[in-house]
Amino acid sequence: MRKPLIIALDFPNMEKTKHFLDLFGGEQLVVKVGMELYYQYGPGIIDYIKEQGHGVFLDLKLHDIPNTVKQAMRGLAGLNVDLVNVHAAGGANMMEAALEGLVAGTPAGQERPRCIAVTQLTSTTKEQMNEEQRIIGSIEESVLHYARLTECAGLDGVVCSTHEVSRIHERIGKGFLTVTPGIRMAEGETHDQKRVATPEQARRLGTDAIVVGRSITAAENPYQSYKKVLEAWEGVKI
Ligand SMILES: O=c1ccn([C@@H]2O[C@H](COP(=O)(O)O)[C@@H](O)[C@H]2O)c(=O)[nH]1
């Protein structure tokens, strides 16, 4: 099965989003809708993207008390998205509640969206984690801890950086999804990302899906950049 390249649609408005998607003609994509678009347009933006036939990862990173997250997930389950997420730092009870909400809100006959948890953001360094979050040890230890917690809560996988993928697969198993942002071409600018990797590294380390934003969306020719990242990710000439 083809492993997804998820394009992060971090655009300021609907017009720019539509213009970007039009560049791909009829090609079926998997895209990520985050806070920037969803907080402005709500379910309407999801309906529009689904109508175009694209898969959707709704990246809202829920983090609140269990009951609030449960009820929010119940609502999101009705949007027919493929993947949603929470912050693992919200704890096991919150993650279990998220799953309960998703199961309860999924319309009969539809598959429930898969649910993953953010471990340590790819913009976080070890120093920040140690000093600001007061979590001791290495990033890898913290990510692994959150991944185990996520698995125990019954979720489908995690968001992490490419560099933690092999340890997670080794400890938890290959069926546990690893979705990795922080993807950059070797020559690319890293922006605010700290734990970055190239698409080739992600493929070699066994990542299940990569999330790519600015390397494609901010490129002069987004379609050409998409093809370049896809070739590197899939390891074949397209
Ligand atoms: O740890 C995380 C979790 C989520 N993201 C999201 O992925 C994209 C990355 O965009 P780039 O432009 O390729 O940096 C963005 O939407 C983030 O919200 C992440 O980067 N790291």
Image (cartoon, grey):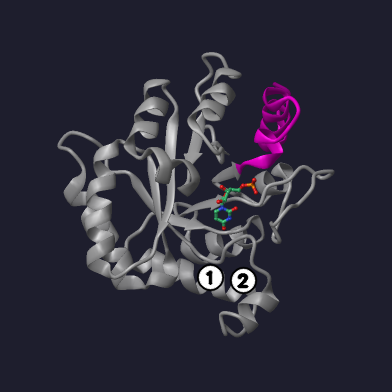
Dominant secondary structure, magenta: helix
Q: Can you give x and y, in whole percent of width and height, for residue 134 in the image? A: 57, 85
Three-letter code for the amino acid on which mark 1 is drawn: Leu
Q: Is residue 78 left or right of residue 119?
A: left
**Is label 2 in contact with label 1 (beta carbons under 8 Å)?**
yes
Q: Residue 140's spot in the image, x, y percent?
A: 62, 71
Q: Image height check: is 173 above or below 234?
A: below
Give 186 or 220, whichever is nearer the viewer: 220
For label 2, the residue is 140
Q: Is mark 1 within 8 Å of ligand 1?
A: no
Residue count near mark 1 (Cα–Cα under 10 Å), binned few <14, some 14–19, many ≥20: many
The secondary structure type at the circle numbered 2 is: helix
Closer to the camera in the image, 6 or 189: 189
Query: Under tag 1, what secondary structure?
Result: helix
Residue at the (37%, 73%) spot, across then down = 91
The quarter of the picture where residue 162 lies is: bottom right
Residue 143 left/right relative to 128? left
Identify the mark at residue 144; answer none if there is no mark: 1
Tag 2: residue type?
Answer: Glu
